[in-house]
Image (cartoon, grey):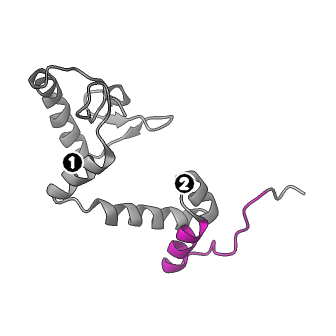
Amino acid sequence: MTTEDIGDAGEALTVRLGDPPLPLPAPVADLVRAYLAEQPRLARASSRSTAWLFPGRQPGHPMDPTGLLDQLRAAGVPAQRDRASAIRQLVLQAPAAVVARALGYHDRTTTHLVVEGGGTWSRYTPGDHSQ
């Protein structure tokens, strides 16, 4: 994700993960604005500029996901638990097999989450049903 994926229209801050861009809620928008305000100072301090929202140690490369996860944990954000909760919500709204393919998970993982959450998509069969 680059800084160009963040749109600031005054009151609303958006993030482009697809089309249309998604508005960020106020507490998150405030954090992102503060972070973006620090980016030029961080780039000057490291003598490199970058378009990555979370720049890595190597010039021109994004931050390693593990490094970002470590920083989130240090800030008190339980990222792993939140990811499981988000996937659990997805499998309650859509077939587990569809969610698994979209996110790159194994069907059994998402099926387990749908059963855990009491969902109704447990008997969905993926594939072409047009015949």
Q: Nearer the viewer, residue 108 or 18?
A: 108
- Provide residue 52's location: percent of width, then percent of height: 31, 29
**Which quadrant of the structure image shows residue 24?**
top left
At x 72%, y 62%, the residue is 126
Res 78 quadrant in image: bottom left
Measure the C-alpha gap from mark 2 to mark 1.
30 Å
Q: How many marks?
A: 2
Q: Quadrant of the N terminus?
A: top left
At horizontal 15% and vertical 36% (from top left) the residue drawn is: 34
**Please, what secondary structure does the residue beneath circle 1 have?**
helix
- Circle 2: residue type: Gly
Residue name at image x 37 percent, y 36 percent: 15
Please tell me how crowded label 1 is: few (under 14), some (14-19), or many (20+) other residues with Cα within 10 Å: few
Camera-side residue of 64 and 126: 64
Q: Nearer the viewer, residue 38 or 93?
A: 38
* 107 w.r.t. 40: above or below: below
Q: Mark 2 highlights which residue?
A: 104
The magenta stretch is: 107-127
Q: Which residue is mark 1?
A: 27
Residue 57 position, x and y percent, is: 22, 34
Q: Horizontally, is 39 left or right of 98 in the view?
A: left
Q: Quadrant of residue 32?
A: top left
Q: Earlier in the sequence, mark 2 or mark 1?
A: 1
Foreground tag (2 vs 1): 2
When the figure is inspected, residue 83 is found, relative to residue 8, above or below; the finding is below
The kind of residue on which mark 1 rests is Pro
Report the side of 116 relative to 29 (left or right): right
Q: Residue at x 37, y 30 (%)?
A: 5
